[in-house]
Amino acid sequence: MRFKYSIVMTGFIGLEGTAKLAKEYEKRITERFPAYLVKDAAGFGDGDDRLGHEKALEIIDEHLREFGAANGEGAHCVEVSKGGILTALYELATISGLGFETDLRKIPIRQETVEICELLEVNPYHLYSGKCMVCMVPEGGALVTGLQDEGINAVIIGHTTDKKAHILYNDGTESHLNRPEPDELERLALI
């Protein structure tokens, strides 16, 4: 089996978690960053993010019907929510039973999330996300094109392999996906 499925991600990680952090730690964040950054981050997951997510669900469903059914095989999607992208990838691995390789540097993240997480010493890969999906699908390039044509952020972040291992690459370093850790919002007692 060579790249049977692509791992496609829609949206950006950490949106709703970033919004919660921006609201809870507004004073601390505005001491370091402009107020507009906090205001923008506090609205993550609403408005265009919500509408884009709803449209993405429709496009993914259509893609799965077209390519999944045509190949006589199931594909798998999970919403990135509590526990962040690494928990979602773990769920995807469990559901699919397939090994995969993923490049963490390809995972979309907004700069506001990076800055706020760095300031608050929060791991964005374990941060509540919402409004994004990670899917293991055939013809991932076609799905990405369909999503991007509708103005939805989507990228291929990895692919399945013949091995059972779940490999994460980060700037040339290889590691294995571990069991999920608690969501960063839980660690901060915000949920």
Image: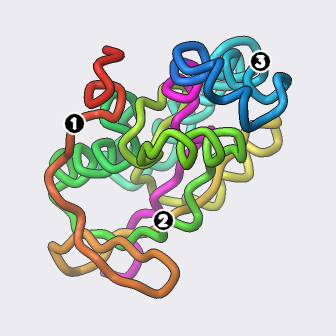
Would residue 18 be counted in the magenta stretch? yes
Q: Which residue is mark 1?
A: 182
Q: Amino acid at mark 3?
A: Lys
Question: Going from the N terminus, do you reach mark 1 or mark 2 first?
Answer: 2
Examine the rendering and report whether any part of residue 94 can be seen: yes
Residue 167 point in image, percent of width and height? 29, 74
In space, the residues marked 1 and 3 are separated at their CA atoms by 27 Å
Residue 169 point in image, percent of width and height? 41, 76
Q: Which residue is mark 3?
A: 39
Residue range in magenta is: 1-19
Q: Amino acid at mark 1?
A: Pro
In space, the residues marked 1 and 2 are separated at their CA atoms by 19 Å
Circle number at residue 80 = none
Q: Is residue 143 depicted above or below 57 in this figure?
A: below
In space, the residues marked 3 and 2 are separated at their CA atoms by 27 Å
Q: Nearer the viewer, residue 52 or 106?
A: 106
Q: Which residue is mark 2?
A: 104
Residue 11 point in image, percent of width and height? 62, 38
Q: Is residue 80 depicted above or below 44 in this figure?
A: below
Q: Dot 3, crowdedness within 10 Å: few (<14), some or many (≥20)?
A: some
